[in-house]
Image (spheres, rainbow, N blue to C red):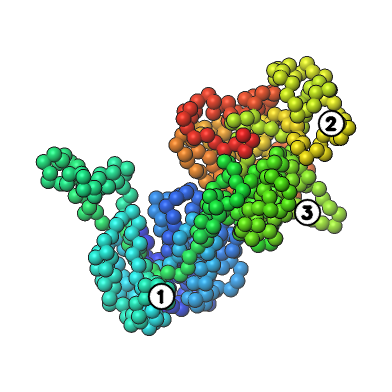
Amino acid sequence: MTANVVPINGQSTATTQQRTHTAGQNGTTEAVSSLYLVRLTHTHETFRRPELEAIATSLNINLKIIDYEPTSPFCVVQLQPRTSPTLQTPSQYHALARAFASNSILAKSIHELYATASDYPTLHSRIKALPLETWTSYQDVSFKFSIDAFFGKRSTSEQRSIIESFSYLPFHGKIVMKRPNEEFVVSEEWELLTPEEHSILHQSCDPRVSRPGDADQDDSIAGTIEALKSRRPKRLFFGRYIGGTKRDLIDKHDLKKRPYISTTSMDAELALVTANLALAGHGKLFLDPFVGTGGFMVAAAELGAITLGSDIDGRSFRGKGKGLDRGVGKNFVRYGLQDRFGDCLTSDLTNSPFRWPGKVSGLKSSRWLDGIICDPPYGVREGLKVLGRRIQDADTPPFESSGENESSIATRRPVHNGPYFVDGVPSHTLPDFVAPKRPYSFNRMLDDILEFAARTLVDGGRLAFWMPCANEAMEEEFPVPQHAMLELKHVCVQSFNKWSRRLLVYQRVVGEMPEDLSDVSDSSSKAVTGMKADDLNQFRRRYFQGFVSADAQSPRDDNG
């Protein structure tokens, strides 16, 4: 049987909808997998391809991206299992594609791709060239046709005309618009409009705006409107719907419906994508060391992981009251994920009980985490803090302000090492106790995150955390941090009006930490000194120096 031909960008790529074989390297025959069209969302473009690659890694699938452009929502892929024997039937490939797409947040659906072209006559000729056996399984089942016009618009009559142009296909089953056995989709990709063109086209549909030919309308605008209305799709795809994705989780986890949040809670879509890029899944153990209101914990738990959390301020995750139905636990109860909620505790990365215990007798490694996901505080509104005491007067409780200037700290007496008492009761045992904090370096925090991940992640485990970056010019001053035991897999950017932030995804390399750790971390954070917030946080200093205007959106800061 001859393989179907689906030209992509002027080239011909073999695919199959029925059982097709080609000669293998050893003279045997092996199946050639189908091409699939992944319909992506047109949001978070820099996250889409990394998510597909992360899903393939998680499912142990060889993903070959045949055609993808960041400006397009259509991605043509080829899928093959890595370890199991080569799949032999189309239904096996379709099951693999269905499982692949069902784990995505940024994709809408996946389709078996039959043909693609730049115009309808060419598309029809390529479909007609396919073997008749291609349609055997669909001749007598219920079906429907759908039109997916990306950045274009089709009237009802135009859609009907397009659908009727496929009447030569040998389908004899009943047309059912709701839940048919099969759905065939015609996907159109139109040229993106500039904001000016979009505004002109929108105004042309307003009855209060003059039309082409009106005396008071500019001739150039009239010509632009006619040109925009006469535009045509630049690419066409014809395929069969295979399966959907996890986009319904975005609505399920909408922050407006969540019982416990704060103003700094990460939106549901990006939290789920972050968990996906960190390979969250069933049987894995995940930690968020800057847990806040637990958005990443919930996202990782939704994907199957057992989750733990910690935060320098226990009030952020405890909420008011006690028990699982308060604070972060309330969110887990809301989604029925209680069995995946480990616990949350008050600590920071430098004073954490989640430690690396070192080599254990009889064990090759004592590393225990499968994933770490977090959005560390940026320290803009307040300087970054870690648990600990400043050098101060022995009779001044560490959690009370002395009102002195930072520069006078060096002249104070050594800190009191014993516990503080309130009415004869140790202060740290009181329910309203807030642990003392001291200034912390922004660069040192980045180093500590990578070091903690390198010492606790299992081989292949992932670290995914967010890092602010005002603009492209700031990338040299705030480069992506590196670690010898962590491989940088993805850098995804979320842009705002005047600033941006990056999601950095690392994977733990195979092997134990070297004995000499002096060269493991590649960063200049150790050289950062000082006692003031601006001395310790270059990003905070640059922020207030004006690399964004005063009315720009402020970065997230869990510490207020």
Disc marking residue 180: 1
Q: Using the image as rendered, state which of residue 243 and residue 453 is in the foreground.
A: 243
In the picture of the structure, the residue carrying the numbered disc 2 is 422
- Disc 2 is placed on an element classified as strand
Which mark sits nearer the N-terminus, 3 or 1?
1
Residue 407: x and y in percent read 70, 17
**Tag in front: 3 or 1:** 1
Give the amino acid type for the residue marked by disc 2 in the picture.
Val
In the picture of the structure, the residue carrying the numbered disc 3 is 365
| Residue occupying image coordinates x 60% and y 46% | 261
| Residue occupying image coordinates x 50% and y 43% | 494
Q: Quadrant of residue 374?
A: top right
Q: Marks 3 and 1, how far apart in space?
A: 53 Å
Residue 553: x and y in percent read 49, 35
Q: Using the image as rendered, state which of residue 548 and residue 403 is in the foreground.
A: 403
| Residue occupying image coordinates x 69% and y 32% | 385
| Residue occupying image coordinates x 27% and y 64% | 156
